[in-house]
Image: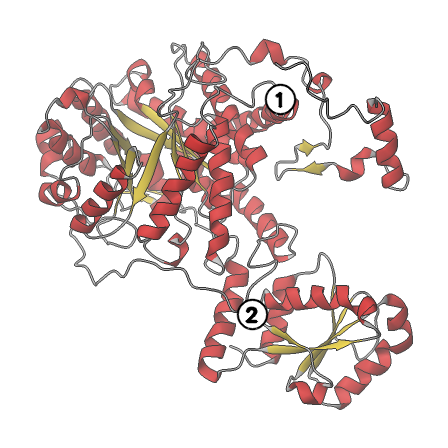
């Protein structure tokens, strides 16, 4: 390294931690560091400063990348050419169109295919038989690019997987085919609430399938353990990780009862987890997942093996209004997945909340990963966050919380029994309610929707999908030929399905009402800004009010007078001093001029002031009141 480099700190006096804490106390006007300490949804503290003493056991538990028990990374040195699989999801209902999209994207940098299957055509490609699958995969080399299945229909995926196995057996070098069948009867129960024929028969079919494909396709995996559904239902990070482990353990337990030993089934599991725009938590979550799986392997006396981890960017964080911001969210989530050590990453298209993504949506999703990999070099270092005191401490705390959730699920009889009894759903519902309350109060801000909304946004394109014939159920013949007759089905297993939420939904519902009104009348719902005093006094609160009501699709109008504005409701904006002198009289005057309701930006109260908006107020509630007063239904 050159010796003439100028240290960036050379112009500053040497400072100690005590000096920093003193500066913090002064800035907080006597408050301690606890005032700027935050908590995750699991109650884990996020401190403003971390040091080595926060994680004294770091050297004992981290180990080395690529070495058992694989706590940090599956490999010691990442593949310089392809550090992780760029796994693009394809959802067009038409198999021929899907094939064209797959071939195009493989030519442009995608290295792995996630084929979403749905016989209804609503959330994936309509594949009902071998001919449909052959059409969708024509020209695709599974020995070069992994083909993974996403089962969006009612089944667990065994029948669809049999179609893929039949297709792969006909390719050159079948033993070189890289497939991820992603079978999971438990996911079927979580998503749909029912497993027809019961869980025992479902796992018997799964076990029989694995026994028949494990030797012909040695580079493939058959099982999936996932926490995506928990995440999309509003679960916390600890709940996601607890479910992820419980999913794997319950799968191994039930397969063992079906005649497939855990030692044979464990290496068939591919784990799927979500990352969102909070990349600090996302990195810690993926690293924690590896630690938890290593502990499970040890508890089950399984040989240490690296976790096969597929990260998918969050769907609940995406918005349909101002969807262009989704590109930033996807980039942050991709960063978390890459730094967290995912083996495969799927970035959802920014326009997926609006419909089926077309070429632009898939191109941005693909290029987000290519830029992260090629230009930013995120995959050049194995476990780049290892040793960072914040990441290590957060991972340790998250592991404790997640293990507690896992133990709770196990105490309830395992994941499926917890689901059938409704215990897990109740815990997730409690956290979901708290999350949505925080969203409504903008304590969890959503850029472009609850914060800085654009009423005149630019629409994003989506695929123009012609009406496509819905398919029948997947042909069971290949499965029957592969595994034979499993026996009579048992009683259906049922549970309350976990819902899928969108964080932006409460605001987007209001925006939908306002936009429908605008299209019908040509005028946007509006509120009059009654500003008091000079610009310097009222500007901050006027901007606050304008931004708040825009989140509900309501335009704030500046006019010389209430009568000239054409509005029927108003919000008073000014300084606290000005409120004391004028607010009550202004509110009375607005009511006399016909204002149906008057808000005030702040805490000042008077008889003619109906509502208040301030930091932490329920914005969804206030905008709902405003739309109701305006007659927008």
Q: Mark 1 or 2 closer to N-term?
A: 1
In this rendering, which labeled residue sits more in front, label 1 or label 2? 1
What whole-number distance in Å separates the C-alpha atoms at marks 1 and 2? 43 Å
Picture coordinates of residue 320 (x, y %)? 45, 58
Q: Which residue is mark 2?
A: 553
**Position of 360 relative to 399 (above/below):** below
> What secondary structure is marked by label 1?
loop
Within 10 angstroms of label 1, few (less than 14), some, or many (20 or more) residues? some
Taking the image as shown, residue 328 lies to the left or right of residue 142, namely right
**Position of 279 relative to 407 (above/below):** below
Taking the image as shown, residue 581 lies to the left or right of residue 68, namely right
The quarter holding residue 346 reads top left
Residue 50 seen in this snapshot: yes
- The residue lying furthest to the front in this view is 4
Q: Nearer the viewer, residue 171 or 629?
A: 171
Q: Which mark is residue 388?
A: 1
Q: Which mark is residue 301?
A: none
Residue at (74, 90) in percent of width and height: 593
Picture coordinates of residue 408 (x, y %)? 53, 29
Taking the image as shown, residue 498 lies to the left or right of residue 195, namely right
């Amino acid at each position: 390294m050159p010796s003439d480099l100028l240290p960036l700190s050379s112009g500053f006096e040497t400072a100690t931690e005590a000096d920093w804490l003193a500066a913090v106390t002064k800035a907080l006007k006597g408050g301690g560091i606890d005032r700027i300490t935050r908590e995750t949804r699991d109650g884990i503290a996020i401190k403003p400063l971390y040091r080595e003493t926060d994680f004294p056991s770091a050297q004992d538990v981290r180990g080395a990348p690529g070495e058992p028990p694989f706590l940090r990374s599956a490999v010691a040195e990442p593949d310089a050419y392809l550090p992780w699989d760029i796994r693009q999801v394809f959802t067009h209902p038409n198999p021929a169109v899907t094939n064209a999209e797959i071939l195009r994207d493989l030519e442009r940098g995608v290295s792995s295919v996630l084929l979403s299957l749905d016989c209804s055509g609503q959330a994936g490609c309509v594949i009902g038989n071998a001919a449909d699958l052959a059409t969708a995969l024509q020209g695709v080399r599974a020995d070069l690019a992994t083909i993974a299945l996403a089962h969006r229909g009612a089944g667990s995926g065994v029948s669809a997987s049999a179609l893929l196995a039949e297709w792969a057996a006909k390719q050159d070098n079948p033993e070189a085919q890289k497939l991820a069948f992603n079978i999971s009867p438990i996911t079927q129960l979580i998503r749909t609430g029912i497993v027809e024929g019961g869980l025992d028969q479902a796992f018997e079919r799964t076990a029989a399938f694995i026994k028949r494909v494990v030797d012909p396709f040695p580079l493939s995996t058959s099982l999936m353990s996932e926490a995506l559904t928990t995440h999309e239902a509003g679960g916390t990070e600890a709940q996601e990780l607890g479910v992820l482990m419980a999913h794997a353990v319950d799968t191994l337990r039930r397969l063992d009862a079906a005649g497939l030993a855990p030692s044979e089934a464990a290496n068939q599991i591919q784990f799927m987890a979500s990352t969102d725009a909070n990349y600090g938590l996302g990195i810690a979550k993926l690293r924690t997942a590896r630690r938890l799986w290593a502990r499970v392997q040890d508890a089950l006396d399984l040989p240490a093996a690296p976790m096969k981890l597929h990260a998918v960017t969050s769907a609940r964080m995406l918005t349909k209004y101002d969807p262009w911001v989704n590109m930033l969210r996807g980039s942050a989530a991709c960063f978390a997945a890459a730094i967290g050590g995912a083996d495969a990453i799927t970035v959802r298209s920014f326009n997926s909340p609006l419909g089926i993504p077309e070429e632009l949506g898939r191109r941005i999703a693909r290029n987000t990963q290519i830029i992260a990999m090629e230009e930013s070099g995120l995959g050049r270092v194995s476990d780049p966050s290892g040793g960072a005191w914040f990441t290590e401490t957060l991972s340790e705390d998250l592991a404790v919380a997640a293990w507690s959730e896992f133990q709770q699920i196990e105490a309830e009889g395992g994941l499926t029994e917890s689901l059938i009894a409704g215990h897990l759903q109740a815990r997730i519902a409690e956290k979901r309610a708290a999350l949505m309350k925080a969203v409504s109060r903008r304590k969890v801000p959503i850029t472009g929707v609850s914060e800085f909304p654009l009423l005149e946004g630019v629409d994003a394109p989506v695929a123009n999908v012609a009406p496509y014939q819905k398919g029948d159920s997947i042909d069971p013949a290949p499965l029957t030929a592969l595994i034979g007759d499993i026996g009579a089905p048992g009683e259906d297993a049922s549970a309350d399905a976990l819902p899928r939420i969108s964080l932006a939904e409460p605001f987007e519902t209001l925006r939908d009402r306002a936009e429908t009104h605008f299209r019908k009348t040509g005028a946007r719902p509006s509120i009059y800004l009654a500003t008091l005093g000079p610009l310097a006094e009222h500007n901050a609160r006027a901007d606050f009010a304008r931004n708040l009501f825009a989140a509900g699709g309501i335009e704030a109008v500046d006019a010389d007078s209430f009568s000239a504005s054409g509005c029927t409701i108003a919000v008073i904006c000014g300084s606290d001093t000005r409120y004391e002198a004028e607010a009550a009289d202004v509110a009375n005057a607005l009511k006399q001029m016909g204002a149906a309701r008057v808000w005030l930006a702040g805490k000042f109260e008077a008889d003619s002031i109906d509502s208040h908006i301030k930091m932490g107020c329920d914005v969804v509630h206030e905008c709902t009141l405003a739309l109701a007063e305006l007659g927008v239904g």
